[in-house]
Amino acid sequence: MQRFFLAATVMLGLSVVWFRPGPTLLIGGDSGCYARIGRELAERPLSSWLELTLAHEPFFEHPPLGLWVNGLVVSWFGPKPEVLVGLARVYASLTLLVLAAMAAEIVSRRGRMMDVLNGPTLAGFTVLGALTLPGFLYESQVAMLEAPLGLALAFGLWAIAGMLKSSTLTHEKLPVGAVVAFAVSMVAGFWVKGPPVLVLIGVVLVMLVARWMRPSVGLIAIGASLLVVAASVFAFDALRESRGLAPFFSTYLSKQVLASVTEGRHHPDRNPFFYVGPTLSWYGPAVGALLLAVLAVALKKRLKFLVRVSPEAMVLGASLWLGVLVGFSVPVQKYQWYVHPGLVGAALLVGSVLVLVPVKIDRFIAIGCVVLALAWPLVRFVSWDSRLSETQKQIAALQSSTGPVRGDAIADCSPMDPWVSGHLFGFLWDAKRVDCTASARWRFDGERVAVVTASVP
């Protein structure tokens, strides 16, 4: 029954990720930008990929790993919006599977409650936890860098779960595989988005303070991962310099990371209530789960019906989610994008609370997941155009247009953000955006891209 429960929840998760109502759009402020970088990479030989370019100018704002993957899929399948949105769905699908494996590993290592809480059950509820988060549902369809970073962090949580002390009394050796996996997740996350991956070190420290991890294991994992990250950074910059290119990571850290922390505040208001609205909107279930988790841990000894409480899962999920919020969102006040990597922790936190439902309900939840997973694809037949925002309608109009070719100029007479429209022009046609009053062969009015007709005197 437990494996059927897990299979049913994963089936529902994959169905929700892959079958969505409405057109497949490159939504998100920076999606067109990253798609454009991928197109420019795909049009050059692999030997030149040491240099990222945006609008054919060097790009230093993010590490290259996620953008290299964009270049690969564009080179294989073409510069199509659905290709990069499909890549985001692949990331989301893998994240669900890794979250399930991580939850099962927690029970395996800390399995003092195997008779009432098994790995597949916690894994299934963790998958459902992800599906309750509006932030995860949104990110699973957005071709930006948060989805691959979330996958790296989920892999890091799985590695941390493998480094926890076992509840058995047998002598434990150093979990080499888990330590290696942790270092891999740190390198992958840093090469996708940079500093936010350091939250994994904070999670390890929390596990050490809680005495759920041997000090030697945690310190070796932290030291080895930082060493590998540093070595990869220096090796990459040395390789670039040997090819006559400027160092990448030193420029990225000084001009992007430090500038973002010290100067690039998106919302310079110090009012802490700024975060209340976005938190409830994107992660409302996680907020409620956090309160319930605290109560469940506090009342565990008094209320015997709370038989499936897993403090390790609750603390592990909460520490990653809150670590991203406090460590990276609050300092630079760029709430939504900087806190999204915490989604994987929020999913585990919500799942560790959902698992508190009575055991007898599990089979009905599983059956419901199967029925909903089979019925969900029908949303593709629902008319969704009327529910699109104005920006989404304009993006849909761009993606359905044909005509412009490489090098064409498009006069942008739409109300769309010029950052978004300019990069979409570049990705779809390698065309150049110009102001509405400038001379151009093509014109975009927000509803269609059309040839500019000469006025009749």
Image (cartoon, rainbow, N blue to C red):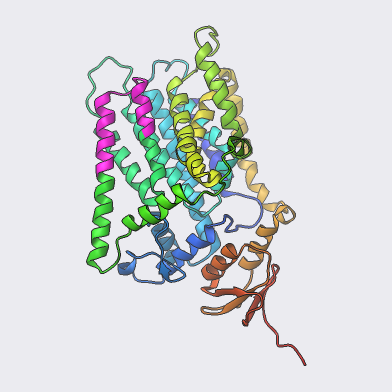
* Residue visible at 71% across and 68% down in the picture: 447
Q: Nearer the viewer, residue 309 or 90?
A: 309
Q: Is residue 257 left or right of residue 223?
A: right
Q: Quadrant of residue 285?
A: top right
Residue found at the very far top of the displayed protein: 302
Question: Residue 285, relative to residue 456: is it above or below?
Answer: above
Percent x, y of residue 176: 24, 33
Percent x, y of residue 14: 53, 43
* Residue visible at 22% across and 18% down in the picture: 171
Question: Residue 442, relative to residue 170: is it above or below?
Answer: below
Residue 6 highlighted magenta (yes or no): no
Percent x, y of residue 330: 51, 39
Residue found at the very far right of the displayed protein: 457
Residue 207 highlighted magenta (yes or no): yes
* Residue visible at 55% across and 33% down in the picture: 128
Whether residue 453 is visible:
yes
Badge count: 0
Most common secondary structure along the magenta stretch:
helix
* Residue visible at 27% across and 57% down in the picture: 236
Q: Nearer the viewer, residue 252 or 286?
A: 252
State which region is magenta. Answer: 202-227
Question: Residue 291, relative to residue 438: is it above or below?
Answer: above
Whether residue 6 is visible:
no
In the picture, the quarter occupied by the C terminus is bottom right
Q: Is residue 6 left or right of residue 21?
A: left
Percent x, y of residue 369: 59, 34
Q: Nearer the viewer, residue 161 or 431?
A: 431
